[in-house]
Image (spheres, rainbow, N blue to C red):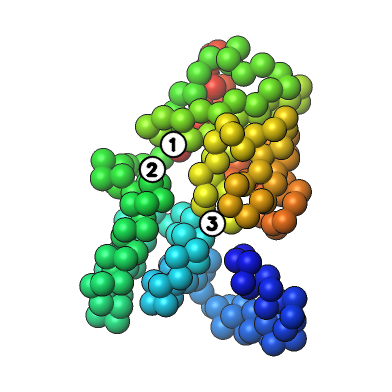
Amino acid sequence: MSDALNYLLKVRPEAMGAYFSFLKQVGTHLDIKTRDLISVITKVAVQTEAGFKQYVRRALRNGASAQEILDALLMAFPALGLAKIVWAVDLLLQMDLPEFHPDRLDASPEWRDLGALDDFPVGETRYLSGEGGAFFVHRSAEAIRVYEARCPHQGTPLTQADLEGTQLTCPKHRWAFDLPTGACIARGDRPLQHLPHRIEGDRLQVYR
C-alpha cells in the first residue's frame, strides 16, 4: 500500500474503511485473476504508477500470464487511448520483468538450474541473477527456500545490498522480510514470493 493510502487510513479511517469494504463486495462474483486484470486497467486509466506496478505483480502471482495482461491493456484501448497504453508499456519495460521479455512471452514455466546443492551452505543466503530472473536462496537445517528477488509491495528489485544476515529490507518503503520463513516482519503485510523448487541429483532447480 502506498504512503498516501496509509496516511488516509490513519486520518480518515471510517471513510477509507467503507471504501475498501465496497471494493471487496463489488468483486464477489469475479475470480481473483479477473479482478487483478481489471485493477491493472483502472491504474492505467488514472496513470497511478505505483498501483500499476503493484497490480501487474499481483496479477502474475495470481495466475495471469504476460500475454493476458497485454491483451487486457490492448482491449481497453478504446477507453484508455494510445497515450495511456504507451505509458503502461513504458512502465512494464522499466520493471524489466522476465515474463514480458519478447523471447519469453509465450514460454511456459520450466525447471531452471540454480547450481550445485553444495553451493548453498546451511545457514546462508545467496543472491542469484540471470536470464531466468533474480532469486534469493536461503538454506536452513530444515529446508531450502527460493524467493523471487522483488518486493511484493510494488515489485521493487531486491539485491545483495538489501540483505543483512537473514533479513531482507526493501530500499523503497523499508518493508523487511525474514528469509527463513519469507514473512514480512516490518512495515508491510505480504510475504516474499516463495517459488517452487526441487533437487535433481546434486542440483537445485527452480520452477520459473
Q: Identify the residue at horizontal 57%, vertical 31% (top origin).
A: 160
Q: CA–CA distance between discs 3 and 1?
A: 17 Å
The residue that disc 3 covers is 154
Left or right: 166 as drawn, with respect to 103: right
Q: Identify the residue at horizontal 30%, vertical 78% (top origin).
A: 80
Would you place residue 79 above or below residue 56 in this image?
below
Type of residue at label 2? Pro
Q: CA–CA distance between discs 1 and 2?
A: 6 Å
Would you place residue 76 above or below residue 64 in this image?
below
Q: Identify the residue at horizontal 58%, vertical 15% (top origin).
A: 119
Mark 1 residue element? strand
Q: Position of residue 161 (x, y in %)?
A: 59, 34
| Residue 36 in sight | no
The residue that disc 2 covers is 98
Sequence order check, earlier mark of 3 and 1: 1
Mark 3 residue element? loop
Q: Are marks 1 and 2 in contact (CB under 8 Å)?
A: yes
Viewer-proximal residue among 68 and 128: 128
How would you rate the neighbour count of disc 2 (Cα within 10 Å): few for under 14, some for 14-19, many for 20 or more? some
